[in-house]
Image (cartoon, rainbow, N blue to C red):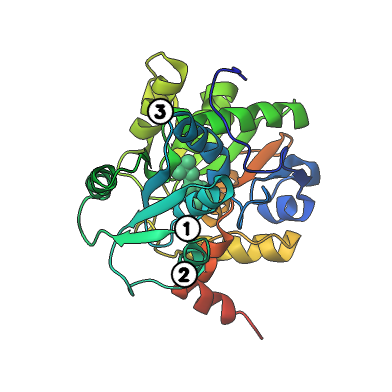
Amino acid sequence: MDAAVPHVLLGTWPTPLEPAPRLARALGLADEDLWLKRDDLVGLAGGGNKVRKLEFTVGAALDDGADVLVTTGAAQSNHARLTAAAGARVGLDVVLVLAGSAGAASSGNLALDGLLGARVVWAGDADLEATALSVADDLRAQGRTPAVIPFGGSSAVGARGYARCAAELLEQAPDLVRVVTAVGSGGTMAGLVAVLGPARVLGVDCGAVTDPAAEVARLLTGLTGTPYDPAVLRIRRDQVGEGYGALTEPVLDALSTAARAEGVVLDPVYTGRALAGLTAAVADGDVVPGERTVLLHSGGLPGLFGHAAAVARAESLLE
Ligand SMILES: *Cc1c(COP(=O)(O)O)cnc(C)c1O
């Protein structure tokens, strides 16, 4: 890595790459075809993919002399929770600008946001980024130095975290044929594609943004410094269902399949969709046996407990 790029250590690296032979078999692959990259196990406050991005965005904020972090997200945002944790870890205050209003969501990530000492500003129906900018203006008027971290931590700076993950993966599995990842704000896929190239990364859209390919291409352009064509990206959009946050039957199947086959718990918004997308890709021949596929476990477990419908369906599986 370029030593001049600001960075702060927030996690424990490298994360494990684990075989998943029973899950492989359940999908119709051979035992040795499927591996899990355990970015849920990064060591900071419930873990997840946002930690790698925050190492660069918070590093840049510290470099700029910030004394408070401001970021945005859904009420159950994993990124918001991990920004709160990162702030606590490096001694910065954190303000979270969340969609909706107080009381509309509970438990899960929100409970952790409280423990971690973040201040929450509810944006109601207002534009999240605009609200964050006005919160930052208010902080400046009070003599503070805010750093605004973009939605999902996805900027060209944040995406560097996943370029690093891709390099780590190539050391652990030089023969990898593809990495499957959930796509939310796009920074994770952008970082992976920057190092692995577009053919080796299969994204599964979770419905967080209207045009995920354009978003990933925009981030890749910023990260690599050359214009990137969205048409070369491989993104499945068949798992969005009723939209971001809405539970689907294939996702519910994916959650119980992973849990029962490997003792690995996925989340209903992101990683469950990634596995549902991989399952569909095997079924339609896009992913075939005899090749090493890595499924990125990007975290999200706290969000499971903040998703009332998913918790109810999970509990209904008890016999
Ligand atoms: C945010 C998130 C993603 C998606 O990552 P992006 O970089 O926003 O596309 C995937 N999995 C989990 C658990 C997340 O919280």
CA separation in Å, label 2 and label 3:
29 Å
Report x, y in % for residue 10: 62, 42
Q: Are marks 1 and 2 in contact (CB under 8 Å)?
A: yes
What's under tag 1, amino acid-wise?
Val
Label 3 CB less than 8 angstroms from ligand 1: no
Residue 57 appears in the rendering: yes
Q: Does 230 sit above or below residue 150?
A: above
Check the image and name the residue furthest to the left.
126
Q: Which element carries disc 2, helix, strand or loop?
A: loop
Residue at position x 27%, y 47% in the image: 142
Q: Which residue is mark 2?
A: 307
To which quarter of the image does residue 17 belong?
A: top right
Whether residue 236 is visible to the viewer of this picture, yes or no, is no
Q: Amino acid at mark 2?
A: His
Sequence-earlier tag: 2 or 3: 3
Q: Which residue is mark 3?
A: 219
* Callout 3 secondary element: helix
Q: In the depicted view, which residue is nearer to us: 259 or 302?
A: 302
Of all residues shown, which one is farthest toward the bottom? 319
> Could you say where residue 143 lies in the image, as x and y percent from the top left?
30, 43
Q: Disc 1 marks which residue?
A: 269
Front-lying residue, 32 or 120: 120
Left or right relative to 80: residue 260: right
Label 1 residue SS: loop
Q: Is the CB–ligand 1 distance for label 1 below 8 Å?
A: yes
Q: What residue is rendered at 21% in x and 59% in y? A: 125
Place of residue 303 in the rendered image (x, y in percent of width and height, measured from the top left): 51, 63
